Image: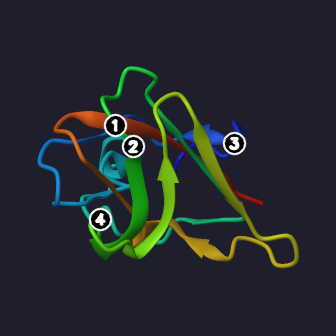
Amino acid sequence: MPDLAINPFGLGKVAVPTPGSPVSLLVNYSSFTGNADNTKDLFANKWTVQANANNKGPIYIGALSMVRSTLVNVIGIVQPGQSWTWQHDVGMNKYHIGDYYLDADNANDWGLPVVDVC
């Protein structure tokens, strides 16, 4: 588990090497937890994805099954240099971060996910 004394904390750069192949927000999870399964339980109360200002186009946030062309299962679209935040105001740590992915229109565009764990 990451050092939760530093909260919120970044999950590292999440790049999309192949548009149309979503990448887990937890792609770097094993590098700082030692856990080889990047889908393990990381729940957060609030999370943000910031798109790199030098991206060539938007990044998409959604489920593994998201379809950029129809926006099915897309929950957010983030333009270069912008950010998108989702927060649960009533419950604590309601979002299972392993359920969310990034996709992009352009290869190697990336975002930085940051989570706030209560």
Residue 73 in the image: state x and y as whole percent: 40, 78
Rendered image: mark on residue 58: 2
* Sequence-earlier tag: 2 or 3: 3
Q: In the shown orientation, is residue 3 left or right of residue 16?
A: right
Residue under numbered circle 3: 8
Q: Mark 3 or mark 4: which is in front? A: 4
Residue under numbered circle 4: 68
Q: CA distance from mark 4 to mark 1?
A: 12 Å
Q: CA distance from mark 2 to mark 4?
A: 10 Å
Please say if the residues under marks 1 and 2 sit with CB atoms less than 8 Å apart: yes
Q: Residue at x 82, y 78 (%)?
A: 91
Q: Is residue 115 visible?
A: no
Image quadrant in which the C terminus is located: bottom right
Q: Crowdedness of circle 2 by 10 Å Cα count: few (<14), some, many (20+)?
A: many
Please say if the residues under marks 1 and 3 sit with CB atoms less than 8 Å apart: no
Residue under numbered circle 1: 57
Q: Give the camera-side residue of 79 and 12.
A: 79
Disc 1 residue type? Gly
Residue 62 in the image: state x and y as whole percent: 42, 68
Q: In the shown orientation, is residue 57 left or right of residue 1?
A: left
Secondary structure at numbered mark 2: loop
Q: Quadrant of residue 63?
A: bottom left
Disc 3 residue type? Pro
